[in-house]
Amino acid sequence: MSQRLVIVGASAAGANAAHRALQLGFGGEIIVLAPESGAPYYKPALSKQYLSGFWDDERIRLSTIPWSDLNIRSESAVSLDTRSQVVGLSSGHELDYDYLVLATGSSGRKLPNMPPGHQVTDLKAVQALRNALTPEWDVVIIGGGLIGSELGSTIRAMGASATIVDMHQAPLEKALGPYGNQSAMELHHAKGVRLMLGETIVSADTAHGHVALELASGQEVQGNAIAYATGVTLATTWLSDSGLALEADGGVSVGEDLLVDGFSNIAAAGDIASVRYIHTPAGRRVEHWLNAVEQGRLAIDNLLADSPEERRPFRSVPLFWTELHGNLFHVVGDPSESTEWNVIEGTVASSKYVVTGRKNGHPIAYLLANSPARLAEYRLRLYEELDNNDAALP
Ligand SMILES: Cc1cc2nc3c(=O)[nH]c(=O)nc-3n(C[C@H](O)[C@H](O)[C@H](O)COP(=O)(O)OP(=O)(O)OC[C@H]3O[C@@H](n4cnc5c(N)ncnc54)[C@H](O)[C@@H]3O)c2cc1C
């Protein structure tokens, strides 16, 4: 009898898992659960090229994924019974599986007691913001991390005004390190993004197209709309009764081979996968596009491997990028763990520089500002440095 592979979620991890299964010539049936309409799309462009209108609805789609060769069901998974190997669907139907990939990712985190606003984590929501935005608008962005900062940058480039409110004084320090944060804040200042940092919100009202925030410092912020960039919530509540090992934040605990603990026929990939490495038994989740792509592919290789010996561990140096006011920042490794930062190439004043982040004296991250041509070299260099330093290995 033909075997069935079910992939839940169809973004970076899920779509690439499906593509990989096709490439490997999986002879059974491949069913992808994809509740969002249309072919998968490139999420990193949402806050950049897509919001600005530079990319249209066609260009943002992942055109290399052979979507029409797959059996797509536009519905959500609502439950998982691992004993009978069945996924419950939002339609009330059930789907049995032989192999299962969990790739449900994340959606924008909702803050309690805050009025409705624009969540920018899916295509429809960004479409709505793009269609509504006029140059007369002043958008209040809650959260000044990577996505909030990109929103500020894009909205200014579209000719509208933007105000970022964040509880941290250095909202990008965790993601970009202190030099990257400093550069980003200077760029925001230079381009007219208003920054309200180290501020907590006491009250927020939206009525008749007008937003009014009261901050703990006593300052007030006015605008025409709110956009939320306050992090993400993992889409794993549907697994809560499944018996799978979920972490406190909803992450799905997997081994180095991305297989879910105790199951050789279930893998998890992308934002939700919390990988327990030999050196970091606590589990490590990465919320980056490339991580999800690479994990989606490896999840399939390992699920469909002929024998356990053929399974490979996920070994990759994290990589992400952000674009702010025309400046490109790439980060390899995990800057959030770095305790010591040094400029090793260029100068911060020239906007083109490379910084190394170290922990216990060992390099664990590099930030490259406006140096994309150096990216491959630094990623490889870090891979080798981590490989030679067991204590810092991901
Ligand atoms: C605005 C924005 C900008 C970003 N910019 C960058 C960037 O510049 N660089 C970078 O590296 N990363 C960036 N990221 C992060 C990156 O996009 C994510 O890490 C990546 O999309 C994770 O992929 P994923 O497949 O794990 O999950 P997701 O992309 O979150 O996709 C999960 C999919 O599963 C579906 N799903 C959810 N629940 C269910 C269910 N119960 N049943 C069936 N399907 C379900 C969802 O509809 C969704 O399509 C950005 C993210 C956003 C939102």
Image (cartoon, rainbow, N blue to C red):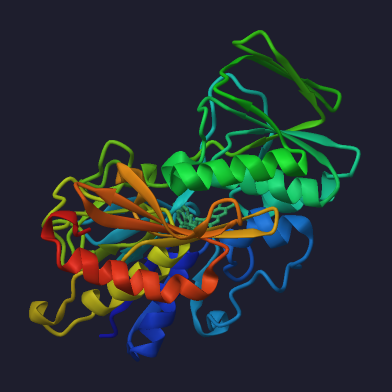
Left or right: 294 as drawn, with respect to 68: left
Of the 4 image quadrants, the one containing the C terminus is bottom left
Q: Position of residue 38 (x, y in %)?
A: 64, 68
Q: Residue furthest top?
A: 218
- Residue name at image x 53 percent, y 67 percent: 371
Residue in front for this viewpoint, 101 or 383:
383
Residue 233 appears in the picture as rendered: no
Front in this rendered view, residue 258 or 220: 220
Outermost residue toward the right in this view: 136
Q: Is residue 380 left or right of residue 71?
A: left
Q: Residue furthest left?
A: 309
Q: Residue at left 45%, top 71%?
A: 375
Residue drawn 35% across the image and 52% down it: 272
Instruction: Please tell me which residue lies in front, 108 or 367.
Output: 367
392 is higher (above) or lower (below) than 24: above
Above or below, 48 relative to 101:
above
